[in-house]
Image (tube, grey):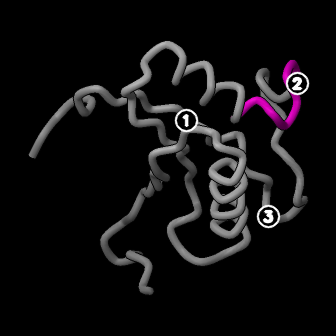
Amino acid sequence: MRSGPLPRTRRLTASSAVPTPSLCKWRSNVFYNVLGSDYVQIALVAARSVDPNAKLYIEEYGAEKVNAKSDALFYLAQDLKSMGIPLGGIWFEGHWVTPQIPTP
């Protein structure tokens, strides 16, 4: 098993990017407070300008099952791609305890 970051990959964490399921609004963080809801696309474009070959990802926790958060993450990715924003994929952060592993 490989340890450490993947080569030529930049991990952009958008954990605070996805609207919260209960409130259907963006979670407040320093980037959102300064740049507004466009901060994810701004960050992806800026990262691409630094390394044109980087694989760029958005990441979220609590979206490993189909739910409001996974739907929001899917639509965020779809919107970014439709605008031509560089996005290589979605990472899912998961914390499982053996007897509580989610089922599909």
Q: Mark 2 to mark 1: distance in Å?
A: 16 Å
Give the residue at x 39% y 28%.
Answer: 54
Task: State the residue position of label 1.
Answer: 13
Give the residue at x 62% y 42%.
Answer: 15
Q: Is residue 90 left or right of residue 5?
A: right
Say if 102 sits above or below 62 in the image.
below
Quick one: label 3 or label 2, which is nearer the N terminus? Answer: 3
**Helix, strand or loop for disc 2:** helix
Task: State the residue position of label 3.
Answer: 21
- Judging depth in this view, the residue of 31 and 77 nearest the camera is 77
> In this picture, which residue range is highlighted in magenta?
33-40
Q: Amino acid at mark 1?
A: Thr
Labelled pair 2, 1 in contact (Cβ < 8 Å): no
Q: Mark 3 to mark 1: distance in Å?
A: 18 Å
Q: Mark 3 to mark 2: distance in Å?
A: 19 Å
Q: Is residue 73 left or right of residue 91?
A: right
Give the residue at x 49% y 13%.
Answer: 50
Circle 2 Cα neighbour tier, 10 Å, few/some/many (<14 / 14–19 / ≥20): few
**Helix, strand or loop for disc 3:** loop
Q: Amino acid at mark 2?
A: Asn
Does the magenta-highlighted stretch encompass residue 57?
A: no
Task: State the residue position of label 2.
Answer: 33
Q: Amino acid at mark 3?
A: Pro
Say if 49 sits above or below 102 in the image.
above
Circle 3 Cα neighbour tier, 10 Å, few/some/many (<14 / 14–19 / ≥20): some
Q: Give residue 45's position: percent from left, percent from top.
A: 62, 26
Quick one: label 2 or label 1, which is nearer the N terminus? Answer: 1
